[in-house]
Image (spheres, helix red, strand yellow):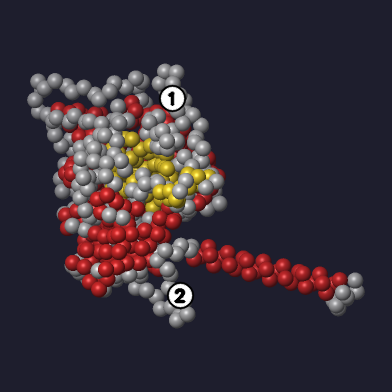
Amino acid sequence: NPNPNPNPNPNPNPNPNPNPKTPKPKKRKKAKTENPKAMAPPARLLLAALAATGFAPQVAPAPQRIRGVNLGGWLVLERWITPSIFKDGWDDDGWGFSSYNPDSVAADQWNFCTRLGPEECSKRLEAHWDSWVTEADVATLADAGITHLRVPMGYWIMGDVQEGEPYVTGDLQYLMRLGAWAGRYQMQVWVDLHAAPGSQNGFDNSGRYGNATWALDSVNVDRSVQVLGDFAQHVSDEGYGDIFTGVGLLNEPKTGSNLMTLTDFYERAYAAVRTHLPDAAVFVGDSFNPSDFNWFWAHGAPKVESPREGATTPNPLAQATAGRAFLDTHIYHVFTPALRELEPADQIHRVCNGEKDWIDQCCWDDGKPTELGRIVGEWTAAFDQAPSEELENLPLTDLTPARRSFLKDFVKAQMVLYEQPETKKGALVESLEITGWFFWNFKMELEQYREWNYLEGLRRGWIPKLPKDRTDKRLASQLFGSCENIHAGVVANAKNLEGVVNPYPPPQPTDDDVTPIAPDAPIPDVPTAAYTMLWVVTSLGLLGAALIGIAMYKYGLLPFER
């Protein structure tokens, strides 16, 4: 159903209790202090109703690995995930994934609310928040072996909307409702600050497409620290610390020369979260370059004072003890033209080798693993067709049996890699442990993006069901075989997989002397590589000219006297 609001009544309480004689359910834990940003009364009624219908959350056994999905397009809008909410009632039909005119097209949440105004924006978003993520979705995912839900959220989640900002609030109660559902199905929720004030990357999923100005203003950074601390306090006060067990400090920061601003923010935000949730996992974005973080938190972070009487939190970053801080890397073949063109066997080879090497760029200190763990916070089954308005307008074709077969192998290979244990060669660590993964996304509205849709992949068989027993400690490699064995199977099946790869946008013509990219070669940042080469050539030229000039001057070869 493309309509994001199948229920015209956006009542967040699906299970009202009409019996006035029913005893009032108890809260999960009585808050020690009154939280000035406490949950709104409707959310309290909602959780009370869940309790009245048999809600009895249990702390899930700690899984061997994180196996999660992202709930994208929910609390932070993304037009390509839920286009219907952008199109209904609009005069234009613009899409705007990578470029758009903000005066005519609402391609992000900022412009969505700007054009609608606060009242209509709130009305539409309330309906969307109530319907896009359902308890049935959560139950299906839990049954398929998913242990964690990663939730992108905006900085306005706790009510921090300043003058001139069009965002509306009210989404917190739906996030807490998700926490109640997760508790029912023994799942954990990891939130992630996807949208920061000023935008940390200029992407539509940061709330506002355009310039990334977050790191240029200390007020933006301060507000980000504040919202993370406020949310952690809220979760603690409401007694949900055993369900909201992870906090991502900033999604995909694109800070350029502001790396020190970013790492200083990470230190402050880490302290703000751990002050209220001392046992929560904390994960940080790698800014698209894992190697930049080899030095960061290499020997743990300082102790953080705990609000509990006289206690201090022990070093939370030591993998040998808690293993609760992670560097988050996102991996997508589909956004790199050279990777979109790889044949099936080379796609798998790239996963087993190239992506493994990319993740292994961090975190090391003098040849030994540091105390910062590794997770893959986003990846997908799509491999050869980049999201775009043009792709959406192409005729939709059925998936062939060969493509479904390859999709399943592509998914399995990534699951195996992103759950890999630490490997050693003799006494030396050869590859780092990767603690788990979150697939992007749990579902999509458009059939064109079915390969991004975890629930659809489960239904149609290209995403395998994992053991739902939380005590089952088998890794993906024990379920599906090694990455190398999956690659060997695809190689053996190469004839049947001919024609599976159909890159979009189509490959551009290249000169005959251009060597195709190797499946395990690093993918360069073309603009950066080009500018670097230009700088090197120019510098060498200037240096050479200077040396020649000096020599000519010394030996009197210049057309003027010394």
Q: Does residue 114 appear to the left or right of 473 in the view shown?
A: right
In which quadrant of the rendered image does the C terminus lie?
Answer: bottom right
Helix, strand or loop at mark 2:
loop
Residue occupying image coordinates x 45% and y 75%: 515
Sequence-wise, which precedes: disc 2 or disc 1?
Answer: 1
Helix, strand or loop at mark 1:
loop
Q: Is residue 149 above or below residue 58?
A: below
Res. 8 visible in picture: no
Q: Is residue 401 above or below residue 310?
A: below
Image quadrant assignment for residue 247: top left
Res. 379 visible in picture: yes
For mark 1, does the 10 Å Cα neighbourhood hold few (<14), some (14 to 19), or many (20 or more) residues?
some
Q: Does residue 89 appear to the left or right of 190 in the view shown?
A: left
Q: Is residue 219 above or below residue 253?
A: above
Disc 1 residue type (three-letter): Ser
For mark 2, does the 10 Å Cα neighbourhood hold few (<14), some (14 to 19), or many (20 or more) residues?
few
Q: Position of residue 320 (x, y in %)?
A: 42, 36
Which callout, 2 or 1, points to the residue nearer the camera?
A: 2
Residue occupying image coordinates x 21% and y 68%: 402
Residue annotated with mark 1? 306
Residue occupying image coordinates x 48% and y 47%: 428
In which quadrant of the rendered image does the N terminus lie?
Answer: bottom left
Q: Position of residue 542 (x, y in %)?
A: 70, 69
> Which mark identifies residue 515?
2
Residue lying furthest top: 309
